[in-house]
Image: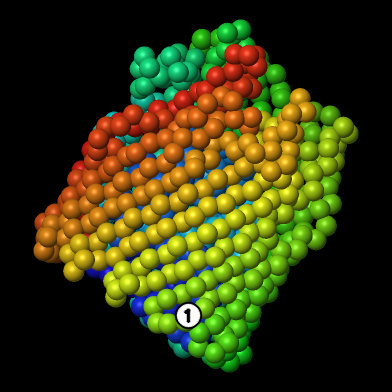
C-alpha cells in the first residue's frame, strides 16, 4: 500500500519525481508524495543545486544496525564505522571525515536540527528504516537555511506522516540479531495519527551485545480548507550496549572478533528524547508561513578503555553527557509572481549542557567502582541566533539565479564546577555567509549549474578554548568558502547523469574533540573533488546506478607543535575515492533481486601523514525478495557477500610514547545473513 500524506500542506515538502526533470537533483527510488501545488514551502531541489534524494523503497526494507548506514547508498558518502557500542559511527561527505574532530554535516529529522552539541549525529539512531519516507542530502556551501554545523552540507530524514496503513517487519539474522518494527498511520477528516515502535537486540559481530528501542508518535490537525495545520511529534529512545574496544594490529591478526579483557566492563547507556510542535499557515495562495518549536534531550553514560600501552597507563574513562536543546524556527515563503520568490526565516537554539569525565587507574578489568580522578565537571550554555534571506529569480525560461545571505551570532557561558569559576564564550561577532546559485537550461533535459557560498565552523564543548579562560588561546570562526560547477543530463527518459567539480577552502580550521578537551588548530585547508553519478532503468524490470567520487582534503598552511610545516599534508581519515554501484531486477510481480557494492580508498591516520594509510575496502551486499501475497513478503539479505576483511583505523597517539604510537582498529563485520517477514495491512 502506498503511503498517503496529508493532502494539503505537507504534500508540498517534496514534489513528485516528474517535477525534478528541470533541476539538477538525482532521485533514487520512489518518493511517495503528491504533486507540488502553487503554494507551500520551497522544496530544496527548487532552490539548491547538489541535491540527492533516497526514496522510501530504497530504505524501508534495509537491515542495518544503525540508520546512519542507510545514507551509504547515496553517492560520495563516507561511512565511519567505529562500532563501539552506542558510539557506532556516522555518515559524512565532501571530504569531511567522521572522526568527531571536525563535524561538518548538519543533520535534521523532519526539518528539525538534530546534532548534539559537538556536531555528532547521534539523534539519527532514533529513526528506524520502516519509519523513513525519504532521505535528502544537500551538498556544498550554498544552503542558507542552516548555520551551525552546516559546513559541508546537510542531511534531512523525512519520516512518515498521514496516510492509512499498518506495516510490520520482523527480522532474524546473524550474531543472534532480532528486530521488530511496527508502523501505524490513520488519517480522517483532517486529523492524522502516526505511531512507530522498534526493538532491536543483537550480540553484534564481536559479542559485545546491544539492546535498543525507539518509540514515536505524531498527531496533526488541519483546518477544513487545509490552509492551517498544527501538530505534535514525540520520540523516545534508549540504547544499552557493550563496547568491544579497539584492537592492536597483532590482536587483529590473532582474532578479529575478540573483545580484549581490558574492555570487559566497558559499555554505553544512552537515552534520547524529542518533542516538537509544528504550525503551518497558507496565509494567501502566494504566502506560506512555517513554524517549528522543538526540544531535544541527550543523555549518555559511557565507560571506555582505550588501547593499552607498554607502560600500562592507558586510561579508563567514564564520560557522562547531559544535553538539552530548545529551539524555534520560523520561515516565510512569498511568491511575488511567476519570476520572483522570496524565502526567509529566523531561528534560535539555546543549549544547556553538562559534561563529566572521570579517569580510573588501569587494571584488568576495571569495574568502575574504584576511586576516580575527576578530569571534567562542567555546565555550559551555547546559544545561537540566526536569520537568512534568499530570492529565487527566473530570467526567462532558461536561467535561474538564487542569491542569499545568512547571519549567525553566538553566546554562552561555562561553569567549572570544581573551582566555581565562570567563563564566557568569546565574542565571534556577526558571522556573515553570502550565497549564490545558478541553473542554466540551454536545451531540454540539460542543466548546467554553479554555486558559490560561505559557511563557518565555531568551537563547541565545555573545555574548548573558545571559552575565555586564563591561558587559553582565542580561535576566530573558520570561514569555509565553497564553489561548484556541474551538469545534469537526461540521456533518456529514465536515465540521469550528473558531473560536478567542487572546491572548499577554509581559514583557521580546528580539530575539536569536546569529549577529551582536545583542540588542535589545523590552519588553512582545501577540500576539492569530482563527483560522477549515473542512474537509470533498462525497460521496466532492471534498475542500475553507479557513482564515483574523487576527493582530497589537505592542509595549505599550518604548522605542527614542533614548528614543522604541515602544508601539503592530507587531512587525516579522508579517503581519496569513494564509489558505489548497484542493480535491482524485478522478475514479474513476485520476485526482486538486488546487488550493491561500495568501496573507499585508504587514508592517512595522522596529521603529519607518517603513520601509514589504512581503512580501504570493497564490499558487496545482495538481497532477494519474494511476494508471498498481496500483503506479505519475505526477503533475504546477505551483507558483505564476499566475506571481505575490513576495519576502521585510527591513530592511538594520545597515551603512547611518541616513538611507539601505533594504529588501533575496529574490525568490520564479516558475512552476515538476515531473514525478514514484511506485513502490510
Residue at 60 percent of width and 78 percent of height: 401
The picture places residue 678, in percent across and down from the top left corner, at 22, 54
The picture places residue 669, in percent across and down from the top left corner, at 34, 32
The type of colouring in the image is rainbow
Instruction: Identify the residue under disc 1.
Output: 441
Residue at 64 percent of width and 79 percent of height: 391
The picture places residue 368, in percent across and down from the top left corner, at 57, 18
Relative to 262, residue 269 above or below: below
Relative to 350, residue 420 above or below: above
Q: Nearer the viewer, residue 28 or 438?
A: 438
Relative to 296, residue 51 above or below: below
> Does residue 86 appear in the picture of this structure?
no
Q: Secondary structure at mark 1?
A: strand
The picture places residue 97, in percent across and down from the top left corner, at 55, 42
Instruction: Answer few, some or many: residues within 10 Å of disc 1's Cα (few below 14, many 20 plus, some between 14 and 19).
Output: some
Residue at 34 percent of width and 29 percent of height: 645
Image-quadrant location for residue 357: top right
Amino acid at each position: 500500500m502506498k503511503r498517503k500524506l496529508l493532502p494539503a500542506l505537507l504534500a508540498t515538502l517534496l514534489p513528485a519525481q516528474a517535477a525534478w526533470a528541470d533541476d539538477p537533483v538525482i532521485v533514487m527510488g520512489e518518493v511517495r508524495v503528491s504533486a507540488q501545488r502553487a503554494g507551500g514551502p520551497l522544496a530544496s531541489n527548487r532552490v539548491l543545486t547538489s541535491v540527492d534524494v533516497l526514496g522510501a523503497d530504497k530504505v524501508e526494507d534495509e537491515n542495518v544496525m544503525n540508520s546512519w548506514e542507510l545514507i551509504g547508498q547515496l553517492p560520495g558518502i563516507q561511512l565511519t564505522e567505529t562500532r563501539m557500542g552506542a558510539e557506532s559511527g556516522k555518515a559524512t561527505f565532501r571530504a569531511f571525515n567522521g572522526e568527531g574532530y571536525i563535524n561538518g554535516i548538519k543533520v535534521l529529522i523532519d526539518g528539525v536540527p538534530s546534532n548534539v552539541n559537538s556536531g555528532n549525529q547521534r539523534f539519527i539512531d532514533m529513526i528506524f528504516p520502516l519509519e523513513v519516507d525519504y532521505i535528502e542530502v544537500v551538498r556544498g556551501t550554498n544552503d542558507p537555511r542552516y548555520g551551525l554545523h552546516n559546513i559541508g552540507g546537510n542531511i534531512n530524514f523525512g519520516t512518515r506522516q498521514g496516510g492509512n496503513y499498518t506495516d510490520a517487519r520482523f527480522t532474524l539474522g546473524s550474531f543472534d540479531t532480532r528486530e521488530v518494527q511496527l508502523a501505524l498511520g490513520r488519517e480522517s477528516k483532517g486529523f492524522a495519527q502516526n505511531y512507530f515502535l522498534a526493538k532491536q537486540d543483537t550480540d553484534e559481530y564481536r559479542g559485545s551485545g546491544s539492546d535498543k528501542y525507539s518509540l514515536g508518535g505524531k498527531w496533526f490537525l488541519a483546518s477544513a480548507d487545509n490552509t492551517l495545520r498544527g501538530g505534535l511529534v514525540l520520540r523516545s529512545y534508549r540504547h544499552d550496549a557493550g563496547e568491544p574496544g579497539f584492537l592492536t594490529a597483532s590482536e587483529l591478526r590473532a582474532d578479529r572478533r575478540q573483545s580484549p579483557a581490558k574492555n570487559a566492563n566497558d559499555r554505553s547507556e544512552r537515552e534520547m528524547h524529542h518533542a516538537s510542535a509544528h504550525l503551518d499557515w497558507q496565509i494567501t495562495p502566494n504566502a506560506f508561513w512555517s513554524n517549528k518549536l522543538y526540544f531535544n534531550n541527550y543523555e549518555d553514560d559511557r565507560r571506555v578503555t582505550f588501547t593499552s600501552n607498554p607502560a600500562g597507563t592507558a586510561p579508563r574513562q567514564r564520560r557522562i553527557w547531559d544535553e538539552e536543546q530548545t529551539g524555534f524556527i520560523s520561515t516565510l515563503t512569498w511568491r511575488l509572481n511567476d519570476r520572483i520568490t522570496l524565502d526567509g526565516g529566523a531561528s534560535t537554539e539555546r543549549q544547556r549542557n553538562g559534561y563529566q569525565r572521570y579517569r580510573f587507574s588501569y587494571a584488568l578489568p576495571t569495574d568502575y567502582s574504584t576511586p576516580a580522578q575527576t578530569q571534567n565537571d562542567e555546565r555550559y550554555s551555547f546559544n545561537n541566533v540566526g536569520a537568512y534571506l534568499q530570492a529565487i529569480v527566473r530570467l526567462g525560461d532558461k536561467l535561474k539565479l538564487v542569491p542569499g545571505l545568512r547571519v549567525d551570532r553566538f553566546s554562552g557561558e561555562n561553569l567549572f564546577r570544581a573551582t566555581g569559576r565562570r567563563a564566557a564564550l568569546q565574542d565571534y561577532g556577526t558571522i556573515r555567509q553570502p550565497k549564490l546559485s545558478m541553473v542554466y537550461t540551454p536545451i531540454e533535459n540539460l542543466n548546467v549549474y554553479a554555486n558559490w557560498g560561505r559557511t563557518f565552523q565555531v568551537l563547541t564543548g565545555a573545555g574548548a578554548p573558545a571559552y575565555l579562560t586564563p591561558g587559553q588561546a582565542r580561535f576566530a570562526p573558520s570561514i569555509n568558502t565553497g564553489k561548484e560547477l556541474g551538469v545534469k543530463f537526461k540521456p533518456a527518459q529514465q536515465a540521469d547523469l550528473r558531473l560536478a567539480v567542487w572546491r572548499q577552502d577554509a581559514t583557521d580550521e580546528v580539530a575539536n574533540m569536546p569529549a577529551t578537551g582536545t583542540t588542535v588548530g589545523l590552519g588553512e585547508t582545501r577540500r576539492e573533488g569530482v563527483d560522477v553519478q549515473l542512474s537509470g532503468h533498462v525497460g521496466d524490470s532492471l534498475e542500475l546506478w553507479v557513482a564515483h567520487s574523487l576527493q582530497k582534503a589537505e592542509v595549505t598552511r599550518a604548522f605542527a607543535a614542533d614548528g614543522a610545516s604541515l602544508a601539503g599534508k592530507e587531512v587525516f581519515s579522508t579517503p581519496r575515492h569513494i564509489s558505489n554501484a548497484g542493480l535491482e531486477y524485478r522478475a514479474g510481480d513476485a520476485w526482486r533481486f538486488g546487488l550493491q557494492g561500495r568501496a573507499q580508498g585508504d587514508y592517512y591516520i595522522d596529521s603529519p601523514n607518517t603513520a601509514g594509510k589504512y581503512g580501504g575496502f570493497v564490499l558487496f551486499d545482495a538481497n532477494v525478495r519474494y511476494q508471498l501475497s498481496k500483503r506479505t513478503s519475505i526477503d533475504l539479505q546477505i551483507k558483505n557477500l564476499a566475506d571481505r576483511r575490513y576495519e576502521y583505523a585510527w591513530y592511538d597517539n594520545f597515551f603512547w610514547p611518541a616513538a611507539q604510537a601505533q594504529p588501533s582498529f575496529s574490525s568490520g563485520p564479516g558475512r552476515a545473513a538476515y531473514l525478514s517477514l514484511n506485513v502490510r495491512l
